Image (cartoon, rainbow, N blue to C red):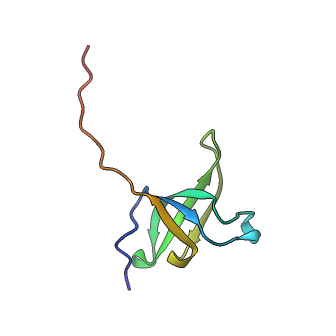
């Protein structure tokens, strides 16, 4: 079954501990790639400075979406 609810750049939070990756339930990351035809997701976990400290593939039962990626707005810079 393909999960159409999770998209690139969505923010997700872990709902399980992953001690083998030093990640705990509640940590948030960004979906950076859809895997296995959209039934798994590559998620990057970054610190406050934007440095990635872990990037792993997750199944849908390991996380929840906490913020959907928004559409990019068109805007003009006025000089």
**Residue at x 61%, y 55% (from the top left corner):** 45
Q: Position of residue 59 (x, y in %)?
A: 53, 76
Residue 44 in which image quadrant: bottom right
Q: Is residue 78 left or right of residue 19?
A: left
Residue 26 in which image quadrant: bottom right
- Seen in the picture, residue 52 relative to 62 is either above or below; the reply is above
- Seen in the picture, residue 50 relative to 14 is either above or below; the reply is above
Q: Position of residue 38 (x, y in %)?
A: 41, 75
- Seen in the picture, residue 49 relative to 66 is either above or below; the reply is above
Q: Is residue 2 left or right of residue 55?
A: left
Q: In this orientation, which residue lies closer to the viewer: 2 or 13?
A: 13
- Seen in the picture, residue 62 relative to 74 is either above or below; the reply is below
Q: Is residue 2 left or right of residue 47?
A: left
Q: In this orientation, which residue lies closer to the viewer: 45 or 5?
A: 5
The mark total stands at: 0
Q: Position of residue 71 (x, y in %)?
A: 30, 49
**Residue at x 40%, y 67% (from the top left corner):** 6
Query: Which residue reaches farthest top?
Result: 79
**Residue at x 27%, y 23% (from the top left corner):** 77
Query: Which residue reaches farthest bottom?
Result: 1
- Image quarter in which the C terminus is found: top left
- Image quarter in which the N terminus is found: bottom left
């Amino acid at each position: 079954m393909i999960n159409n609810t999770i998209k690139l750049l969505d923010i997700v939070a872990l709902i399980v501990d992953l001690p083998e990756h030093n990640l705990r339930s509640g940590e948030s990351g960004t979906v950076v790639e859809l895997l296995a035809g959209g039934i798994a997701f590559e998620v990057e976990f970054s610190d406050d400075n934007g440095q990635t400290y872990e990037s792993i593939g997750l199944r849908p039962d390991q996380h929840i979406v906490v913020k959907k990626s928004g559409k990019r707005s068109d805007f003009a810079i006025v000089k």
